[in-house]
Image (tube, rainbow, N blue to C red):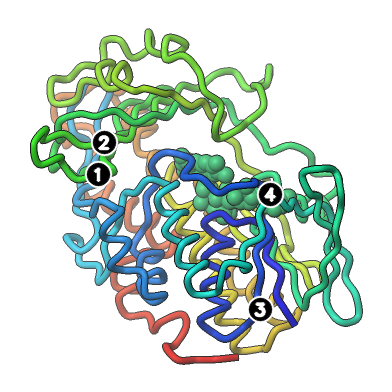
């Protein structure tokens, strides 16, 4: 029987491609009427790139993403705290990509349509509720004009994002995602290459920071790249913030004054902010970890299971890895609740601790140490925090997030090529 997937985002589409690879029929139900390339930049860590490569998408990914060369942490006064090579330069067998989220989603969507056929993604259908049955699951889907349809399948994989309807049914008292006090303003601007031309740069302190990375190669004539940036400020969370929505547009003047003097020569923060056509606001939210993602024949995946702060650039990567691990469990246990439970047992504890680690600022927590030790202003970082201390911290984060170099390089494929359920 067919596997029903709710949500045609990064996780849901990867799940559909994985089901197809292992010979499991599936259909994706997506709430929006038309999938469009929404969002701005995201990073795909080598563990996720490995999975997409195993799905035969490595070459296409290389055409939409920029291979990240460097990850750099910079103090409030523009001086380097730490920089390290990334992707293949760091010894991984797979690159790390900085990519426009919408372009990645469209790449996955086109692959699903061409491999599974045009009826495999049903848009304009929002999961409303589910009911476990003896033979599988029945779901109710709301359609645009107010009608509801029901569908039956062997499993429901709910990849319906931060406001998952399936999660709301599993955890009826949970309510809205939790806002910790930070607000992100996100945009893209055309600008000249910065540092290596493929650097992820994070500047500032725990309370005020700016992230930048390019998501296109430099234009052959202009020499300019599309620079993705995120400006972030922290407020008192007790008053709450408005609704979180990835697509809320705001005026840059709302936060620009706080960054007005952040021109370090090599990085002109106010210049980049001013050059953006559109700025999106997103209060940084997550959810408290939960002790199960499975209810009978229903399993949560991606943000529906474990939305996390984007401080470690691993929300999309984890959604992709989830889909692949679930595929491996379907191969091992057959299409049923046992596979869902095995997927949950494999991932839940580690991913829950990653959610909490990211709530504690993830790799960016180093900025807190610098702040504590010297108030954030220094000439030579060695006087404040020795480099081996940072290196150890970074290794621990990568191990927790599933992309420690040696472990990943030596791991067998999550799904052996040619395996079928
Ligand atoms: C429009 C949009 C823009 C984003 N932009 C960014 C960004 O710029 N930077 C960033 O770091 N992250 C962004 N994200 C979040 C990021 O994509 C996810 O954190 C990550 O990729 C995990 O993927 P996911 O599949 O779990 O969730 P998502 O990629 O969010 O996908 C969830 C999908 O489920 C659909 N959906 C929601 N409710 C239902 C329902 N009831 N029934 C059926 N379908 C439903 C949504 O429309 C969406 O397509 C964005 C998400 C969205 C939806």
Q: Secondary structure under badge 4? A: loop
* Marking on residue 216: 1
Q: Is residue 90 left or right of residue 65?
A: left
| Image position, residue 346 (x, y; %) | 59, 74
Between the C-alphas of marks 2 and 1, the distance is 5 Å
- Taking depth in this image into account, of 2 and 320 the one nearest to the observer is 2
Q: Which residue is mark 3?
A: 342
Which of discs 1 and 3 lies nearer the camera? The answer is 1
Between the C-alphas of marks 4 and 3, the distance is 28 Å
Q: Which residue is mark 4?
A: 31
Do tag 2 and tag 1 residues touch (Cβ < 8 Å)?
Answer: yes
Q: Which residue is mark 2?
A: 226
N-term-proximal mark, 2 vs 3:
2
The N terminus - image quarter: bottom right
N-term-proximal mark, 4 vs 3:
4
Whether the residue under disc 4 has CB within 8 Å of ligand 1: yes
Q: Secondary structure under badge 1? A: loop
Mark 1 crowdedness (10 Å alpha carbons): few <14, some 14-19, many ≥20: many
Between the C-alphas of marks 4 and 1, the distance is 29 Å
Q: Is residue 379 left or right of residue 417?
A: left
Residue at x-position 19% and y-position 45%: 217
| Image position, residue 327 (x, y; %) | 57, 78
Q: Secondary structure under badge 3? A: helix
Which of discs 2 and 3 lies nearer the camera? The answer is 2
């Amino acid at each position: 029987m067919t596997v029903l997937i709710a949500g045609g985002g990064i996780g849901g589409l990867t799940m559909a491609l994985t089901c197809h690879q292992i010979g499991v029929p599936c259909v994706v139900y997506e709430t929006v009427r038309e999938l469009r390339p929404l969002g701005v930049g995201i990073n795909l860590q080598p563990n996720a790139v490995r999975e997409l490569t195993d799905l035969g998408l490595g070459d296409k990914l290389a055409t939409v993403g920029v291979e990240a060369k460097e990850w750099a942490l910079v103090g409030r006064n523009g001086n380097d705290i730490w920089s390290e090579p990334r992707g293949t330069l760091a010894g991984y067998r797979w690159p790390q990509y900085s990519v426009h989220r919408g372009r990645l989603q469209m790449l996955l969507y086109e692959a699903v349509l061409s491999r599974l056929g045009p009826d495999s993604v049903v848009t304009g259908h929002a999961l409303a509720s589910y009911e476990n049955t003896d033979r599988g699951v029945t779901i109710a889907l709301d359609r645009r004009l107010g009608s509801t349809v029901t569908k039956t399948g062997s499993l429901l994989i709910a990849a319906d994002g931060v406001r998952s309807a399936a999660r709301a049914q599993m955890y009826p008292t949970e309510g809205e995602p939790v806002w910790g006090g930070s607000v992100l303003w996100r945009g893209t601007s055309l600008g000249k290459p910065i540092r290596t031309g493929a650097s992820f740069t994070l500047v500032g302190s725990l309370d005020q920071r700016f992230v930048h990375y390019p998501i296109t190669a430099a234009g052959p004539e202009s020499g300019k790249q599309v620079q993705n940036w995120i400006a972030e400020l922290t407020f008192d969370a007790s008053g709450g913030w408005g609704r979180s929505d990835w697509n809320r547009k705001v005026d840059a003047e709302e936060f620009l004054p706080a960054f007005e003097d952040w021109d370090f020569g090599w990085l002109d923060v106010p210049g980049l902010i001013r050059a953006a056509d559109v700025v999106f606001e997103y209060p940084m939210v997550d959810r408290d970890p939960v002790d199960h993602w499975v209810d009978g024949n229903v399993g949560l995946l991606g943000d529906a299971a474990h939305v996390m702060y984007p401080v470690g650039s691993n929300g999309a990567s984890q959604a992709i890895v989830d889909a692949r691990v679930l595929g491996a469990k379907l191969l091992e246990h057959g299409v049923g609740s046992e596979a869902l439970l095995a997927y949950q047992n494999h991932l839940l504890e580690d991913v829950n601790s990653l959610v909490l680690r990211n709530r504690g600022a993830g790799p960016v927590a180093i900025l807190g140490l610098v702040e504590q030790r010297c108030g954030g202003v220094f000439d030579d970082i060695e006087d404040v925090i020795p480099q081996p201390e940072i290196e150890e911290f970074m290794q621990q984060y990568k191990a927790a997030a599933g992309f420690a170099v040696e472990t990943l390089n030596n791991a067998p494929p999550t799904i052996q090529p040619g395996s079928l359920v």
